Amino acid sequence: MPDLALVIFIITYLGVAIGRIPGLMLDRTGIALLGAIAMIASGTVPLTEAMAAIDLPTIILLYGLMVLSARLRLGGFYTWVAGRTTRFLDQPRLFLLTSMLLAGLLSALLANDIVCLAFTPVLCLALLKKGLNPLPFLLGLAAASNIGSAATIIGNPQNMLIGQVGHLHFGSFLLWCTPPALLAMGGAYGILCRTYRGCFAAPSIPQTLVQTPEWPEFDRLQSAKGLIAMLVLITLFFTPIPRELSAITVAGILLCSRKMHSRQIMELVDWHLLTLFCALFIVVHGITSRNVPGLIMEAMAAHGLTITNLFALTGISTILSNLVSNVPAAMLLVRFLNPEVPQQWYVLALSSTFAGNLVIIGSIANLIVIEQAKKFHIEISFKEHARVGIPITLFSLLVLVLLLYFRHGLLPPG
């Protein structure tokens, strides 16, 4: 009889990969939460172990950054920045480059999911009114936010997990991961320009479809406070102070506002993502406590495929990230990395993030852009995304592989 923990894990991860369970109104977060509940209710993971399995420092860091992003969003900062790029609409290629660079930079500093959530509506509205084809620009936004977020520990949820569990230094991570991220960004821009050459224009759109929605007005003072808080926080990340302590302290200060109600800020915190993290920690603990992943790794090693080889790690991370998305993939793989070898952690961060561009379900940022675009009657199909996502991912991973080969003198297995 199959081990109950393994059955629960397989059903949960299949559900997270597919995004739903037939006959039930469950999304990925609901499925992960149900899996965690099943682990606890069945006695597979005792309640005390379940609480201990949740990596609280990672959750606190993620929460603190969400509060900071919420403050900037309520201050109209994201909308203002995205709107400023529209001055280049008459030069589509320059507009694409500018929007991708901005999305990449802000994703590296403020988490890519929030950037996609704020930028997508503004881009959709501006592009439709200008009569431009929104597809290359929205796909560029998703790709750039994923690639840019790979450069820092705070760029995306999986990097936060990797940085916290691996106790990685913020500056060392930045120096190691920024060069491949910049090269990958340049490749993504070139691929988009080539793919949509001569296709930047679109038929005129009826004005009934492009009415301006209500967005927070730009508040210079509140945005300045948020940006100062961000700079202070990043400075603290270079100190020995635990990142989660710095993040939660800055978040607490930002909640003290005379103009923004704390409820408004809390409503913009992504509680679904936090719940997803907590639930997956418990589900993964359920099978690791029975050494199921360890046995799988031993079987792979018997065939010459060891996760300690950085090329093999790149391939395994890429495949797993596109089977179950990059956050669940990182949660599984961090348990097998050596804390004494930071390169393993850097490679996992880059490969799992770059892999998010391959197909739609590879990262939450892709799903956010697609769902937000639907509100403006813009459909981005699986095929259309893969048309640029696959070459962008292959180019990005090639950059990583060449970096390992030339800069670090590493050789592929075999």
Image (cartoon, rainbow, N blue to C red):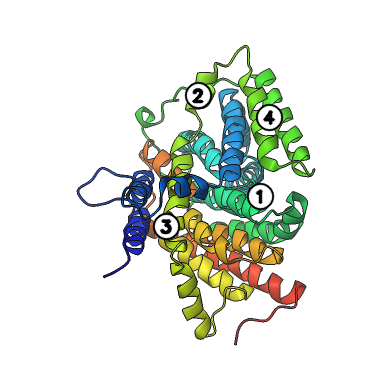
- Dot in front, 2 or 4: 4
Label 2 close to label 1 by CB (< 8 Å): no
Kind of residue indicated by mark 3: Gly
In which quarter of the view is residue 88 placed? top right
Q: Residue at x 54, y 53 (%)?
A: 143
Identity, as a three-letter code, of the amino acid under mark 1? Ile
* Of callouts 2 and 1, the N-terminal one: 1
Callout 4: helix, strand or loop? helix
Q: Residues within 10 Å of mark 1 (few under 14, many from 20)?
A: many
Q: Nearer the viewer, mark 2 or mark 3?
A: 3
Q: From the image, state whether disc 3 or disc 1 is nearer to you.
A: 3
Secondary structure type for disc 2:
loop
Q: Is residue 411 visible?
A: yes
Crowding at label 3, few (<14), some or many (≥20) Cα neighbours within 10 Å?
A: many
Q: Nearer the viewer, residue 222 or 288?
A: 288
| In the foreground, 70 or 62 | 62
Disc 2 to disc 4, C-alpha distance: 25 Å
In this rendering, the answer to whether 281 lies above or below 254 is: below
Instruction: Find numbered disc 3 in the image and state the secondary structure of the residue it sits on.
Output: helix
* Between marks 3 and 4 in the image, the one whose residue lies nearer the viewer: 3
Q: Name the foreground residue: 356 vs 372.
A: 356
Which tag, 2 or 4, sits closer to the chain's start? 2
Tell me the residue that label 4 is attached to.
250
Q: Name the amino acid, label 4.
A: Val
Q: Which residue is mark 1?
A: 153
Q: List the residue tagged with mark 3.
A: 286
Q: Is residue 371 above or below residue 164?
A: above
Picture residue at 71% right of the left edge, 78% below the top = 410
Q: Which residue is mark 2?
A: 215
Q: Residues within 10 Å of mark 2 (few under 14, many from 20)?
A: some
- In the displayed orientation, state which residue is furthest to the bottom: 414
Q: Is residue 137 visible?
A: no
